Image (spheres, grey):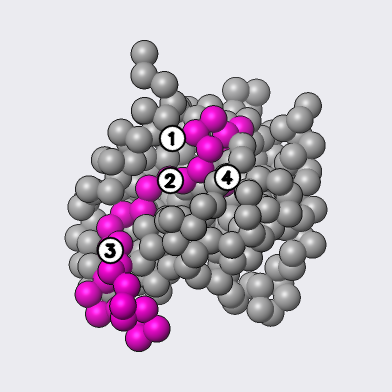
Amino acid sequence: MPEKPELLGALNDEIVTCRKCLRLVSYREKVAREKRRAYRQWTYWGKPVPGFGDTRAQLLILGLAPAAHGANRTGRMFTGDRSGDFLYAALHKAGFANQATSLDRDDGLRLKNAYISATCRCAPPENKPLPEETSNCSGYLERELQILQPKAILALGRIAWDGYLETLKRRGVIASRGLYKFAHGAEAEVAPSAPRLYGVYHPSQQNTQTGRVTPAMYSSVLHRIRRFLEK
């Protein structure tokens, strides 16, 4: 039977070639052609962004979607934008990453016991995927869960929280996602057979620059997760 790295590699190869959502295909490729002035020398990735991290991870970190000039440019989750700067600094401090910075796919970053994915794999206009677009990606998340068999899920924001719960609902693990309320620091034992679910506010500039999210807030939740994983 294939090992986890091989299974995840095959899944990521499939994700990268996906063209299910015409609106997202058009947008991500338009951004990659036109570029942002600061990155005009870059060759943008311009494709769906696969998962990234330790293939034997106990922690699955679930984001919303690639940023137009972040992961859609670099080809790696939370790489090349301010959200990634905040997230990887927090992961490094908590011992889940070997370095605090994430600039490009060849910068030497390695995750330790963590794997990063998203509810939507293509950069959406205004960072807002449509429900049917998230639904089109849901099968990829389900397969990641089946392969990784994580012990904990960290949802970065309400959409990621709801997206994960919707996956459990489709699988018949829960009857309704409404029983589990999102908040920063929320924690839920959804079902005996399911990973422990944790929630934090998304590390967007809107949240980090206004002080709605601070490094200390992320540190607190990540250390709770680490203690849980070490049990």
Residue 94 screen position, x and y as percent: 73, 49
- Residue 56 belongs to magenta span: yes
Which of discs 2 and 4 lies nearer the camera? The answer is 4
**Earlier sequence position, callout 3 versus callout 1:** 3
Where 64 falls versus 163 (above or below)? below
Q: Is residue 65 visible?
A: no
**Between 110 and 165, the one nearer to me in the picture:** 110
**Earlier sequence position, callout 3 versus callout 4:** 3
Mark 3, residue position? 46
Residue 144 marker: 1
Q: Helix, strand or loop at disc 4?
A: loop
Mark 2, residue position? 51
**In which quadrant of the rendered image does the C terminus lie?**
top right
Q: Amino acid at mark 1?
A: Glu
Q: Amino acid at mark 3?
A: Gly
**Earlier sequence position, callout 2 versus callout 1:** 2
Residue 113 marker: none
Q: Quadrant of residue 31?
A: bottom left
Mark 4, residue position? 111
**Earlier sequence position, callout 2 versus callout 3:** 3
Determine the CA span between mark 3 and mark 4: 24 Å
